[in-house]
Image (spheres, grey):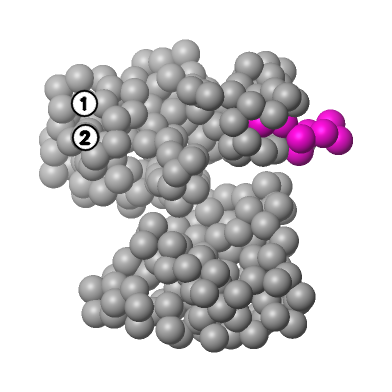
Amino acid sequence: MSNGQLPRDQLGNIPGTAQQVRKDLVTQTGALRAAFEKRFGKPLTITDSYRPYSVQERIFRQRYTTSWVTGIDPRRWLGVTWWRLPGTAAASVPGTSNHGWGQAIDFGSGVNVGNSPEHRWMVENAPRFGWSWPLWARRSPMYEPWHFEATAVPVSNYREFLAGQGVTVPGATPPTPIAPILLEEDMKVIRDETAGSIALIGEAYVGEFGGADTAGIAAATAVFGEWKNVPSPVYRVAVERAAGRMRHARTTLTAEQLAAQITPTLVAAIREAGTGATPEQVEERVRAVLRSV
């Protein structure tokens, strides 16, 4: 099974739409749309969902060029560097998009407008239906308020919530949720085996490094050891849960206090790795991550 080439029997139509997601996500997605419509009195539109490889390639070629234009968001594909065109949204390299696994949706109906009432409602309530706004989509230059990603959850996650709104709970066999990663130590390094991203997660810190961020990856692995390869859905669950702990920790700890916990070891690691980064640059990297979650 390859990204963007899922068998038809593994996909299902979202009720009331022509859009498709992975079959085990259909019930919870329909339930989310029902809850949204009950709250706002309008359908939750979906502008994009499962994305076959051919569509991924078409979108990527529309938005990126091998000619240096703005110098923003460089991507490597087919052995060359591609640059994002001005005024376009980011797109994954063909064969790496979460849309290609049937577990990503782009929403409309106001959800696509950051900090709108609809978007705030989704950020707060969609996770109970297995849908979350990923960390990378919350940051410039990749800011995408419309993009949500899913992991399978049982009906029990949202049954009571729907009942409280007077919405009928869809009758379907609950899918088996993806097991979370158990943190055996305070810090762990995990790698998305599809996208190549590295995440440093723990009880009071979460940071992500893109697959091309060799300095960040060298620093994290030098301090905390080699990463563990995990499937994309498991990676996103682990990062989102760590981010949740991070947001909770910030109610009692300042960004400066949290940065102080991690900066010295990262500085030492980067020096050992010979990347040439100064302590000030490392500290700013840490603070930037803390401010963004």
Pinpoint residue 284: horizontal percent, then vertical percent. 47, 68
Residue 37's label in the rendered image is 1
Q: Is residue 134 left or right of residue 108?
A: right
Rate crowding at label 2 as few (under 14), some (14 to 19) or many (20 or more) other CA atoms within 10 Å: few
Q: Is residue 261 left or right of residue 7?
A: left
Report the residue at 76% width, 35% height from top: 81
Mark 2 residue type: Ser
Dividing the picture into quadrants, the one containing residue 221 is: bottom right
Pinpoint residue 21: horizontal percent, then vertical percent. 53, 29
Q: Is residue 231 left or right of residue 180?
A: right
Pinpoint residue 106: horizontal percent, then vertical percent. 44, 28
Rate crowding at label 1 as few (under 14), some (14 to 19) or many (20 or more) other CA atoms within 10 Å: some
Query: For the magenta stretch, what is the residue range?
Result: 76-83
Taking the image as drawn, is residue 202 in sight?
A: yes
Residue ID for mark 2: 116
Instruction: Indicate the secondary structure of the residue bearing disc 1.
Output: helix
Report the residue at 15% width, 22% height from top: 41
